[in-house]
Amino acid sequence: MVDKKEKSGTVLIRLPRERRDQDDKIVWVNARRFLIKRGVEVEAPKCVAAVLAHEEAMLQKAYEYEERVKNKA
């Protein structure tokens, strides 16, 4: 069975609350702004979830690069 949310192109996402980053997250997609509250499940378009996943992947790559450079020195 296809969920109505899947048909409408939305997904449930939840951003964790962190000690250092308590602010809600603003995501821009095609000149549209979405405010994602931390610590709460929110319904958001799939494109917002994709942007957040891409951001996390790029942060991971940056961290790995920093570790490689630090270990070479």
Image: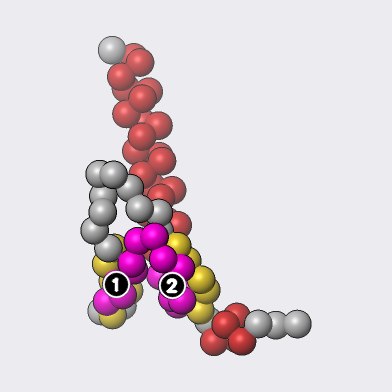
Q: Quadrant of the N terminus?
A: bottom right
Instruction: Based on the picture, tell me whether residue 5 belongs to the magenta stretch.
Output: no
Between 19 and 53, the one lying in front of the other is 19
Q: Quadrant of the C terminus?
A: top left
Q: Earlier in the sequence, mark 1 or mark 2?
A: 1
Q: x and y percent of residue 11 in the render?
A: 52, 74
Q: x and y percent of residue 71 in the render?
A: 35, 15
The answer to whether residue 14 of the structure is visible from this angle is yes
At 28% from the left edge and 80% from the top edge, which residue is drawn? 32
Q: Quadrant of residue 5?
A: bottom right
Q: Secondary structure at mark 2?
A: strand
Q: Quadrant of residue 24?
A: bottom left
Q: CA distance from mark 1 to mark 2?
A: 10 Å
Q: Secondary structure at mark 1?
A: strand
Instruction: Based on the picture, tell me whether residue 37 belongs to the magenta stretch.
Output: yes
The answer to whether residue 49 of the structure is visible from this angle is no
At 31% from the left edge and 75% from the top edge, which residue is drawn? 34
Which residue is tagged 2? Answer: 42
Of labels 1 and 2, the one closer to you:
2
**Residue 35: which disc?**
1
What segment is highlighted magenta in the picture? 33-50
Between 21 and 28, the one lying in front of the other is 21
At 34% from the left edge and 38% from the top edge, which residue is drawn? 62
Classify 10 Å Cα crowding around label 2: few (below 14), some (14-19), many (20 and above): some
Q: x and y percent of residue 18 in the render?
A: 33, 47
